[in-house]
Structures are given as structure tokens and as C-alpha cells.
Amino acid sequence: MAQEFHDESQVDLFLPQLTALPLRDQRETMERPFFSLSKRKRLKPIDYVSPDRKITVHVSANSEYGLATIYDLDILIYCASVLMEHKRRGSNDIPQTLHVVPYDMLKTLKREVGGRAYELLGNALDRLQSTTVKTNIRSGDAVETTFSWIDSHSQLKDRSGNVRGMRITLAKWFYDGVLMEGGVLAIDPAYFSLTGGRERWLYRVARKHAGGAGADGFAISMPTLFEKSGAEGDYRRFKFEMSKIAKEDGLPGYTIALETRDDAEPLLRMKRRDRSSEPLAPPSPAPATVDTRHANLISDDPPIAFPDAGHIAHTAFGAIARASLPSPQRDYGLVADDFRSFLRQREIAMDAKNITQIFATFCAKQRPAS
């Protein structure tokens, strides 16, 4: 289904993306059954109706390509992340058609790079374009919207036939969902290292529901979880697989546990993983100079711990962000998510002695593209 074009003058449109693009997932798709959880070709439609009968999701496949899978979703996560980077940089006109360097996308998605990888990428784009989704999840009433995940995609090849770039035009429904207020959530790059489709889906459920929950986390009954998954096979098999995943407890950032009940089906409880017992590297050394506008906040004693979840607009860190960010219009919720990812990647404790100074320096470096 992909179009090919060989205009060498178009090469400059495909500029390399950031090597460490902050990763975002579209919130509305994180707990409902929009994707096949298996790599096997699936032709059976997904039909979901919420327990209160208010939300419906119907996903149907093209007989040639099959349903889009949760592995194909990686492409949409990458595209959502690029859109949010445009927004972070203050772009006035964020494009619905993205010019993507396949190599950069594959590296970000922790995939092999080579001829076979580009072929698999093309297959995934075909499934995303040919899968039809009908849902009222956004309207909240009987109005249903029908769309495919992407409207079109095309490839730029050089004279040797090598793929140099791709154009991906996103569905308006997905594009609007990413850019609306609160439309995305930051995800751990380790998500792409999860090999099982059910593990990937379960991580997304945990990220949406347990990410902002308190110490008790989020619990859901196993039958409800089964309905939300859209998984093929029977409930008994699903429960066995969920029990196995809970026993292994290997989701990045979240711990999951099965809770049995005498009078009902078991619950699956999801909590943010406690990192306090993990070894922490020494915090980065303080910079030589600090903006005096927030020097009073940086010298606080005792130090202020960066919040492990939630928004920072009305905290001391919100004040630092207002003083330090070159782009005042940026969403401080996204700033907080980016900073938490920054700390995790460098194994810096959120209550490090100079955490406010680290945060101020981090904010000062969030400069829009010139």
C-alpha cells in the first residue's frame, strides 16, 4: 500500500530526529482493545462494550494484512513522541504528515536495523493503514467515529533502492488525541524490550491507572481485564497467562500481583515499583553557576524531594520551571515526566541533595529548536 518516490531533492525533508526522544503514548488507547496482542495474523474482529454500555470499540481487519498489532503500535508511539516534541519546541503548525528517518525510528524502538527490518516496518504500516476502527470513546455518546490509524504512507528510496525516508500521514482522530490537553503519557523506553504482547498491553494499563495512583495502586478484576484486552482465546487461558506474568513481575516501573478472593474471581493489583532499594549512582556534580532568580529555591535545607508522580505547577519545582524554562508555555506535567525519565536513566534519587539544582539545569537546557 505504500507509495514510492525517488525525488532526490526531497531528501532534506527527512532530518534526523533526536537520539533520545522522550516517549509518549496516546492515553485513550492504553486500556481499551484497539490492537491484536499476537504477532500471528488475526482476522477476527475486536468487539468491546464497556460494563456501563457507554463506550464501544470495534476493530476490523483487511483480509490481506490482518489486524494491526500491539507491536505495530510502536510506530504510533514514535509518531506521538515526535508530535509532542514539535509542541514542546513551540511549533505554530504541527504537521499531521511526518517525515521520518526509518533508521532513527528503528533505533528508538530498540529494533534491528537492516533490509529485513525495513520490510517489517512496511508491513506494519500496511496493517495500520488497512485496519478499521469504529469507536465512540471520545464523544461520550452514541456518535461513532470511523478511521484507520494512518491515512497514508510513502517511502523515499535512493537510486540503489535503499529507503532514505518515510512520509506518514496520521489519522485525524489519533493526531487530535495526541495534541489535546492531557492526551499523552510518558512511557519507559524499557517498554520496547518487552517481548510478549500481553506484557506490553498490561504495562500500558498499569501506566495509565497505577501511574498516578497512591500507595495501594490500582486493582482490577480478572474478567474485566480480559474484556478490556480483546485477546483471542478463552478466559481460562487468559487468566493463566496473567498469573504467569504476575509471578514473573517483570514490567518496567510497575509491580503486579494476583490477589485471590473467596467469593469472586481474582484481582490483579498494579503499583508503581519501589526504587528505594535499588543502588543509586552519585548525583551529577552541581554546575559552576546558577541563575540567581531561583537561587533561594536551590539552597533550601533540607533538600526538597522531587515528586515521584503528578503535576508540579503549584510546587517549588513549578517555580523553578517558571524561572528556568526558555519556553514558558510548556506543560509542566510533561516537564515533570521528562525529568523523572531523566532521573531514572541516570539512576539519580528524587531526593538527591542537589535535586533542585539538577532540575534547574535540566529546565535551562529545554530550549526550542532555532
Image (spheres, rainbow, N blue to C red):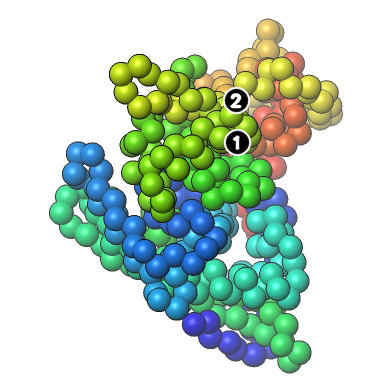
**Which residue in the structure is indicated by mark 1?**
251
Residue 88 visible in this rendered orientation of the protein: no
**Which residue in the structure is indicated by mark 2?**
273
Q: In screen coordinates, is 369 left or right of 143?
A: right
Closer to the camera in the image, 354 or 142 = 142
Q: Nearer the viewer, mark 2 or mark 1?
A: 1
Q: CA distance from mark 2 to mark 1?
A: 9 Å
The residue at the far left in this view is 142
Kind of residue at disc 1? Leu
Residue 216 visible in this rendered orientation of the protein: yes
Q: Picture coordinates of residue 203 (x, y %)?
A: 53, 40
- Classify mark 2: residues with Cα within 10 Å, few (<14), some (14-19) or many (20+): some
Residue shown at 49% from the left, 82% from the top: 1
Residue shown at 52% from the left, 25% from the top: 257
Residue shown at 34% from the left, 44% from the top: 227
Q: In screen coordinates, is 366 left or right of 313?
A: right
- Classify mark 1: residues with Cα within 10 Å, few (<14), some (14-19) or many (20+): many
Kind of residue at disc 2? Arg
Q: Are marks 2 and 1 in contact (CB under 8 Å)?
A: yes
Q: Taking 14 as reference, is 255 above or below it? A: above
Quadrant (top left, top right, bottom left, bottom right) of the C terminus: bottom right
Q: Picture coordinates of residue 48 (x, y %)?
A: 29, 51
Q: Taking 74 as reference, is 62 above or below it? A: below
Quadrant location of residue 13?
A: bottom right
Q: Taking 366 as reference, is 261 above or below it? A: above
